[in-house]
Amino acid sequence: MIYIVVFIFGLIIGSFLNVVIYRVPRNQSIINPPSRCPKCNTKLKWDDMIPLLSYIILKGKCRYCGTKISFQYPLVEFLAGITFVIVFQKFGWSLQFLKWIVFTSLLISTGLIDLSEGIVPDIIVLPGLILGVLFSIFSGKTGMLESIYGLTTMGAFFLIVILLSRGGMGWGDLTFGAMIGSFLGFQLSLLTLLLAFVSGALTGLAAIIIKKKGRKDTIPFGPFLSIAAFVASIYGFEILKIYLKFLHFS
């Protein structure tokens, strides 16, 4: 029963994240005006905005003009619901749970904005960086120093990559990486970089093979950072233990 409650809570937060993902890149307020259909501009009623259910009931179309609703909306809601349950299963009701659902929400919104718009909004990641440092003061083993080590490591790494790649990676990746580092600390930041670059390279290679991308085309790195950081936040130390055991027996 408790997992259902957490899942529903995640759906509600996911619905809000959809507003953030749509409005922030357009420099619109996330509070006003109330939600409207982007096509016919009709103000949506409460029963048009029930997370996940409204999309199913309306068969993926606007009630008023029949325009197809982007599948992103139920996807983000479901993704938030599932990830919140995973976080709860790991940490239970605790400050750690609050910390990591905030982190997860930042990852979802930033990663999807980068995927759809090709930008990493400072208005999300800079406050997120501050939150990461503040949470570290009260959060178990990851103290403030560990948080600072994480954000400076990520920031320095991306700064070097930006300077060497000459435009191959943007400044938004630096701020996003620093924000991730402020939550994860030093060790898990390194793991995040490894997972993100490996998954990004494999995806890029696959896109070239199936001719979806050319060798000179760019792929947003934010989504890979988001996925890698979430995996590291939940399973990071277990992955590191397995890796160290592998080194010991090899």
Image (cartoon, rainbow, N blue to C red):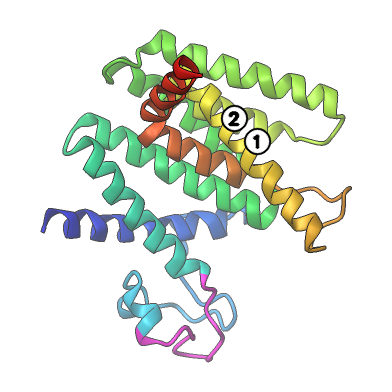
Nearest the camera: 86 or 13? 86
Q: Is residue 61 magenta?
A: yes
Q: Which residue appears at 84% of the width and 23% of the height?
A: 164
Q: CA distance from mark 1 to mark 2?
A: 5 Å
- Disc 1 secondary structure class: helix
- Residue 84 percent across, percent down from the top left: 31, 49
Report the amino acid beneath label 2: Leu
Residues drawn in magenta = 57-71
Q: Quadrant of residue 197?
A: top right
Find out whether the residues at labels 1 and 2 contact each other: C-beta distance under 8 Å: yes
Residue type of the residue flagged with mark 1: Phe
Query: Magenta region, mostly helix, strand or loop?
Result: loop
Q: Position of residue 122 (x, y in %)?
A: 60, 36
Could you tell me which residue is drawn at 53 percent across and 91 percent down?
65
Q: Residues within 10 Å of mark 1 (few under 14, many from 20)?
A: some
- In the image, taking residue 211 as reference, residue 225 lies left or right, namely left
Residue 2, located in which quarter of the rendered image?
Answer: bottom left
Residue at 41% x, 37% y is 103
Q: Dot 1 corresponds to which residue?
A: 197
Q: Is residue 93 above or below residue 182?
A: below
Q: Which of the pair 41/189 is nearer the observer?
A: 189
Question: How would you rate the neighbour count of disc 2 (Cα within 10 Å): few for under 14, some for 14-19, many for 20 or more?
Answer: some
Q: Which residue is tagged 2?
A: 194
